[in-house]
Image (cartoon, rainbow, N blue to C red):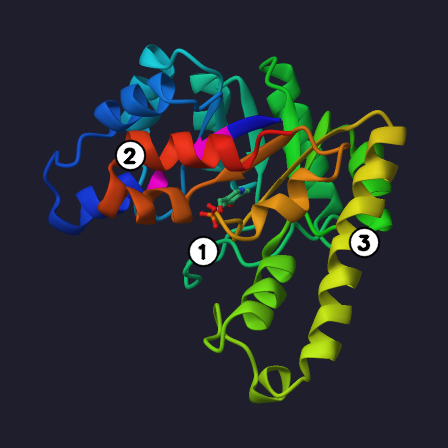
């Protein structure tokens, strides 16, 4: 299992004060030395954390492949094509969202996504699509010409958090919170099954399969069990833990948690 460490949140902290502290290149160095097998960063249209210069510097100094997440915005795609990361992961992006809230809609935006993939391929950049775990999304990803899919594990993570604590992970409706533990367990099993079936189907279609979003030290073992998933991209929980343990320990611990 490849561990991709998302270091966006190091830049979030830096941008909060607009000083070069914490230094993203120091985070890159510590991550590479302590088990990160890939660095994942997201160049958002609003540049709320990672900046263009960060991408350049990270690409220049990283000892492991760099997976650059981006939207299908024309300006961003031109920058990504020029920067040439080891892989581009296309994600949906809304300015008002706190984080990426769902997978790409591969049907409504079929033409734009198809052009984006073509442009990235012309620049010799392999493409992954961040999608909800459904059979239809796997088939459409293949149809559109992607090499890889990243399965959105947000729904799974939300249900896992609801089941395992009395506090909601994010915006759950009261109705959801009132669901009995049995109903939640069923929902959790269903969400894992959906991820598993999607991963199997994607693999059969010849796609590489990654997963990410909302994964943490407690829930990740469920996803690690799915053999067809070969890569995880994890950010928030690692950077959050690093506040208490340091980044090196936080990554080493995630590496242990994701070992098969
Ligand atoms: N994968 C993708 C495509 C994402 O957009 C994100 C969030 O930036 C992640 C993985 C990491 O999610 P988290 O920070 O919840 O671990």
Quick check: 189 left or right of 102? right
> Closest to the observer: 65 or 165?
165
Residue that appears at 41% across and 64% down: 96
Quadrant location of the C terminus in the rendered image? top right
For mark 2, does the 10 Å Cα neighbourhood hold few (<14), some (14 to 19), or many (20 or more) residues?
Answer: some
Residue under numbered circle 3: 193
Q: Regarding mark 2 in the picture, which secondary structure is present there?
A: helix
Residue under numbered circle 2: 247
Q: Can residue 130 be spotted in the picture?
A: no
Choose mark 2 or mark 1, whichever is in front: 2
Q: Regarding mark 1 in the picture, which secondary structure is present there?
A: loop
> Closest to the observer: 242 or 85?
242
Quadrant location of the N terminus in the rendered image? top right
Quick check: 250 left or right of 115? left
Please state the extent of the stretch shown in magenta in the rendering: 4-8
Label number found at residue 99? 1
Residues at marks 2 and 3, CA–CA distance in whole angstroms: 32 Å
Per the image, is 6 magenta? yes
For mark 3, does the 10 Å Cα neighbourhood hold few (<14), some (14 to 19), or many (20 or more) residues?
Answer: some
Specify whether tag 1 is near ligand 1 (CB below 8 Å): yes
Q: Regarding mark 3 in the picture, which secondary structure is present there?
A: helix
Residue 164: which quarter of the image?
A: bottom right
Residue that appears at 49% across and 17% down: 65
């Amino acid at each position: 299992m490849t561990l991709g460490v998302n270091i966006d949140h190091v830049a979030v902290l830096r941008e909060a004060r607009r000083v070069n502290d914490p230094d993203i290149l120091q985070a890159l160095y510590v991550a590479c030395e302590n088990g990160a097998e890939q660095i994942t960063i997201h160049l958002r249209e609003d540049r709320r954390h990672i900046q263009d210069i960060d991408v350049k510097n990270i690409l220049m100094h990283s000892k492991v492949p760099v997976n650059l997440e981006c939207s299908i915005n024309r300006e961003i795609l031109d920058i990504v094509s020029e920067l040439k990361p080891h892989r581009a992961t296309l994600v949906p992006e809304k300015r008002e969202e706190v984080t990426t809230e769902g997978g790409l809609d591969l049907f409504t935006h079929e033409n734009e996504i198809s052009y984006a993939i073509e442009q990235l391929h012309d620049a010799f950049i392999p493409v992954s699509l961040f999608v909800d775990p459904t059979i239809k999304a796997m088939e459409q990803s293949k149809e559109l010409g992607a090499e890889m899919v990243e399965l959105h594990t947000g729904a799974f993570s939300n249900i896992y958090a609801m089941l395992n604590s009395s506090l909601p992970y994010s915006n759950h409706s009261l109705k959801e919170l009132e669901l009995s533990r049995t109903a939640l367990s069923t929902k959790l099993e269903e969400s894992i099954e959906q991820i598993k079936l999607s991963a199997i189907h994607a693999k059969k279609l010849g796609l590489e399969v990654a997963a990410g979003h909302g994964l943490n030290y407690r829930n990740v073992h469920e996803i690690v069990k799915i053999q067809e998933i070969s890569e995880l991209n994890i950010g928030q929980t690692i950077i959050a833990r690093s506040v208490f343990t340091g980044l090196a320990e936080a990554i080493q611990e995630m590496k242990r948690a994701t070992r098969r």
